[in-house]
Amino acid sequence: MTATITPLAGQRELLALLERWLELGWLRPLDRALAGFFAGLDPHAEARVLLAAALASHQLGHGHVCLDLAATLAEPDFALSLPPEGEEGLADAWLPSRLLAGLTLDDWRSALAASPLVAGPEGEAERPLVLHGGRLYLRRYWNYEQAVARSLAARIRDDRPVPQDLSAWLERLFPEPLVLDGERQTDWQKLACALAAASGFTLITGGPGTGKTTTVVRLLALLQATAEQPLRIRLAAPTGKAAARLTESIGAQVASLPVDEAVRRRIPTEVGTLHRLLGSLPDSRHFRHHAGNPLPLDVLVVDEASMIDLEMMACLLSALPAHARLLLLGDKDQLASVEAGALLGDLCRHAEQGHYQPERVRWLERVSGERLAHPALVPGAEGLHPLAQRILMLRHSRRFAGGSGIGQLARAVNEQRAGAARAVLDGGGEVAGLRLRGEQDRALDRLLRQGRGRALGYGHYLERMQATRPAPETPFADPAWTGWAAGVLAAFDQFRLLCAVRRGPWGVEGLNLRIAALLHRQGLLEADQGWYEGRPVLVTRNDYGLGLMNGDIGIALRLPEQDGRPVLRVAFPRNDGSGDLRFILPSRLGAVETVFAMTVHKSQGSEFAHTALMLPESLNPVLTKELLYTAITRARHWFTLLEPRPGVFEQAIARRVERQSGLLESLQR
Ligand SMILES: Nc1ncnc2c1ncn2[C@@H]1O[C@H](COP(=O)(O)OP(=O)(O)OP(=O)(O)O)[C@@H](O)[C@H]1O
């Protein structure tokens, strides 16, 4: 017991422990540095205060904007980035569960409250930490959360007058009653459109293919057609990939709208990134647009809102003029952004139950002619749940209708029904599970290269690269080269291996080496290290100079220079919806990594015809049903689950992301 308490004895012991955690890869250098910095600010700071600061900083890397003290004491080992199985035995003595064994919530809170480094929610703005109830924040994130809460609180009370002929418009935009399996169903899209017409702020959530985009395009037609003056509408998404995907689907939707050509022309079809909308400034966290220089627009639609982190949301809300309508679209059940702040999940915590106030229900039913009915709905009370009145959940997927294996699996995982999920996997076909027998299992190599059945593997894009390459004498400016590169990039999206973790044999790093070596051995790649033709790379940091965003994916291809000499360049989609490509010399690319395998987090906003998910050998803090759901819903046609050890899938289904933030509480205050 003595050994477990010692590191909390004093600053020196604690900092030595944090150093050890750093070596083990359990903590980020930033977290350790922060504790050191705070020790410098307050030489008398208690070890448990510095420990809380390091853990609060570490939580940001896990997507939590604060440290929940009680949750940390309940499950201390999940507070760190514990390694994949195999290393634990070695470091048991260093585990936080040992360290925190003697600490109670009251003791920890009292120590924090008494520290000159820690402020209460209302006071001492210069102190670097804020304690609010049982939650400890780094000051900057506290400020973001407060700013977002203040701004949303104002927007959720922003009722808008609706056109007198709203019912007629809804009838025109949603002409067919919704009938599924021969039964008339509630048309949630029509209800969402009515709700949004009456609000300055609306959040539409729904799983893949539930019609979020369709709904919003029809709403924009309604707003534009009934506005006194043409509205300035902008569409945005958090990543380039998501923006490109939305651009594709919106174009077709606008073209088929049952409205005048003049109205159709006033609905934009181009979707940009949020960074571009706000105007990124090089080497800065700040944007060109902010409260002092607001965005020149009347309506803003942001898709894939689950990927918006707290800092971005704070920047976005401050740059949005008060008169502008804000529409957020997203899937609340997906993983939150990699950065801290699970905004959409927080806001949609009660979306299933609705909590609509009786007067709102009557109004919605009257204007839409729909019945606002569903077994999951819970009636709201007049004056309560103001946020819920602005949120609507779409409940019918058109993409994954009834019998789709992917749809069934996604649903079972989301509802935490492990037995049902396993039964879908065992059923085979569109979805399948592959049990791996050790690291060298050949079945894995086969899947990675060939795929299974009609579901492709990585061999496909490399074969296409060879088979469709223009003749070497094709001049440098010939569009055949761009066409070829676009074809290879599209073929690469036929298959993706996703991983839950980065390290260990079943993590992104090890698997990338393994896949490159495999494809090289099989003669599909000319090399497996350095730069080689066919190397897919992921950009890991925004590069404003090159116009590349974190998350962009390109492929190295040999193309002719002006003098005909072949040179390797990396082909990237332009990500502005134009469908164009750009070619960049590898030597100009700073932060990139090979991306045969990628983390589920990084795959958000993308879709692949065949998606495979590699689970690790043991449970890990990141393994939750949200992670599984996000991975499964990246698959358009086929999904393969790769399991090095039975049981981990079921354990992961049982775990949910515990979102640690105070946003909802702030909004309801
Ligand atoms: N009311 C409708 N009537 C007919 N087809 C519809 C309707 N709503 C959606 N669809 C079709 O269903 C498909 C999915 O719709 P949509 O793209 O709007 O969904 P989404 O929720 O935005 O999907 P994603 O998960 O890709 O974001 C599209 O092919 C769309 O044309």
Image (spheres, rainbow, N blue to C red):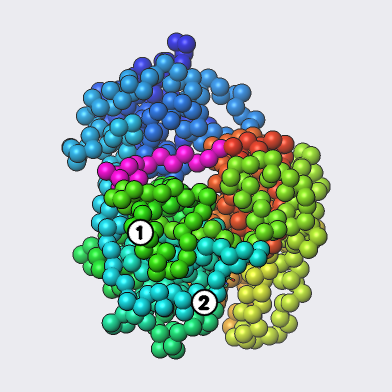
Count neighbours of disc 1 (C-alpha within 10 A) and say few if under 14, some if 14 to 19, many if 20 or more.
some
Seen from the viewer's position, the closer of residues 424 and 573 is 424
Magenta stretch mostly in which secondary structure?
loop
Observer-nearest residue: 164 or 447? Answer: 164
C-alpha separation, residue under disc 2 versus residue under disc 1: 23 Å
**Numbered mark located on residue 523 in the image:** none
Position of 305 with respect to 144 (left or right) is: right
Which residue lies under the disc numbered 1?
360
| Cβ of mark 2 under 8 A from ligand 1 | no
Residue 100 visible in this rendered orientation of the protein: yes
Specify the quarter for ligand 1. bottom right
Quadrant for the C terminus, please. Answer: top left
Is residue 327 visible from the viewing direction of this image?
A: no
Dot 2 or dot 1, earlier in sequence: 2
Q: Residue at x 19, y 39 (%)?
A: 122
Residue position marked by numbered label 2 in the rendering: 175
Q: Residues within 10 Å of mark 2 (few under 14, many from 20)?
A: few
Residue 517 at x, y percent in the picture: 73, 53
**Residue 211 percent coordinates (x, y):** 53, 66
Residue range corresponding to the magenta coloring = 655-669
Residue 622 point in image, percent of width and height: 54, 41
